[in-house]
Image (cartoon, rainbow, N blue to C red):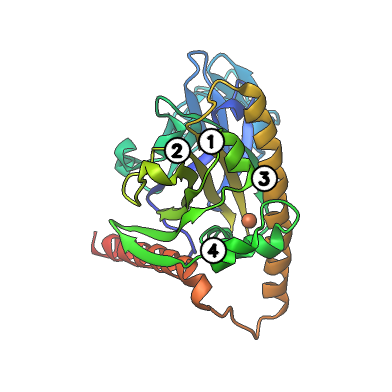
Amino acid sequence: MTTWLRNAWYVAAWDSEVDAAPLARTICGTPMMFYRKLDRSVVAMRDACPHRLLPLSMGLREGDSIRCKYHGLKLGPDGVAQEMPMKSKAVNRRVCADTYAVVERHRFVWVWIGDNDRADPALIPDLWPCSRDGWTFDGGYYPVACDYRLMIDNLMDLTHETYVHSSSIGQVEILEAPIETHVANGHVFVTRWMEGVDAPPFWRGALKKDGPVDRWQICQFMLPASVMIDVGVAPVEAGATLAEHDQGVRGMVIDFMTPESETSHHYFWGMARNFDIEDAGFTARFKAQQGGVFAEDKEILEAQQSAILNNPDMKLSAYRIDEGGVRSRQLIARAIAAGRQMEEQA
Ligand code: FES
Ligand SMILES: [Fe+2]
């Protein structure tokens, strides 16, 4: 029994991470490797040779195929044997490595974890700010040694900013603004709406305008493992509302947590924004700054994971501030249970 949902799309890599040379990455407990064919489309294959299980990612690319570095078994991009180690031997086409459905969208390479015939690209989480006109998007990647759900808890709870990020983005006002949590359309929302406040320096600079603003932070969890945080400010007179707030400057913090094991995950993070979108210097500076902020979370969460393992007689408690994470975990648990029920009935 696993803590993650099967039959779902997960981010395997940034599109720029995958090229002709194989990239090895364990996704949801399965060692996989990813490479681009000559036509640039992506292959995802089990990272274990069908012969003696050497990682295929150590192999040599030949055209669109991969040749194992141990005894030279050659597999096509469909995983099927093309040449046996003894070249004089007839090819046994039953020799093959598993392959997985992949799609490139929103700057990421997505892989389907589950039954390949159920891999419908329409089910990819709608990270729309990553590819919409008028927006720009960039970010980075951290391996994090903790259960992916601890990162979801963290992102659905903005109160931690004050302490974890005291030297960067933490601000006391954040603790003072009321929070509202609700579930809608299968997504969890944690909303903080601050009316007529002073814009902090970052947002003041982005808005390029003085005067009081409405400021918002809206965390949104989507199955199987993503959190988008809608952040920004608009001049009070623009009349921004919860439903409609494109009047000022707006950013979307993008987070995708792909499980690696029960106690580690791949953290893909970034920010999409709808202001100064041609400013590559801003993009690079912001990415560096955001990388620093998320490194603070990584340190806390890895220590938390160790503490969980070292205190097996203790349980996580949930206070009101944890409601967003609690609700997100409920959605995951329910989806896992529903999936299991479907499999039992099939
Ligand atoms: S282990 Fe790959 S060919 Fe032998
Ligand atoms: Fe954080």
Point out the tag, 4 or 1, that comes first from the N-terminus.
Answer: 4
Whole-angstrom CA distance, mark 1 to mark 3, is: 30 Å
* Nearer mark to the viewer, of 4 and 1: 1
Res. 306 image quadrant: bottom right
Give the class, few, some or many, for how many residues have Cα within 10 Å of label 2's Cα (few <14, many ≥20). many
Marks 3/4: CA distance? 20 Å
Residue 39: x and y, percent?
48, 13
Q: Disc 2 designates what residue?
A: 248
Task: Answer whether labels 3 and 2 touch (C-beta < 8 Å).
Answer: no
Where residue 239 appears, as percent x and y from the top left, is 35, 45
CB atoms of marks 4 and 1 within 8 Å: no
Say which mark, if any, is on residue 142. Answer: 3
Residue at numbered disc 4? 157
Distance from disc 4 to disc 1, alpha carbons, whole Å, reads 26 Å
> What label does residue 177 carry, if any?
none
- Pair 1/3: label in front: 1
Q: Crowding at label 3, few (<14), some or many (≥20) Cα neighbours within 10 Å? A: some
- Tell me if label 1 and label 2 are in contact, CB under 8 Å: yes
**Relative height, residue 214 to residue 158 (above, below):** above
Neighbour class for label 1 at 10 Å: few (<14), some, many (≥20)?
many
| Residue wearing tag 1 | 207
Using the rendered view, name the quadrant where residue 238 is placed.
top left
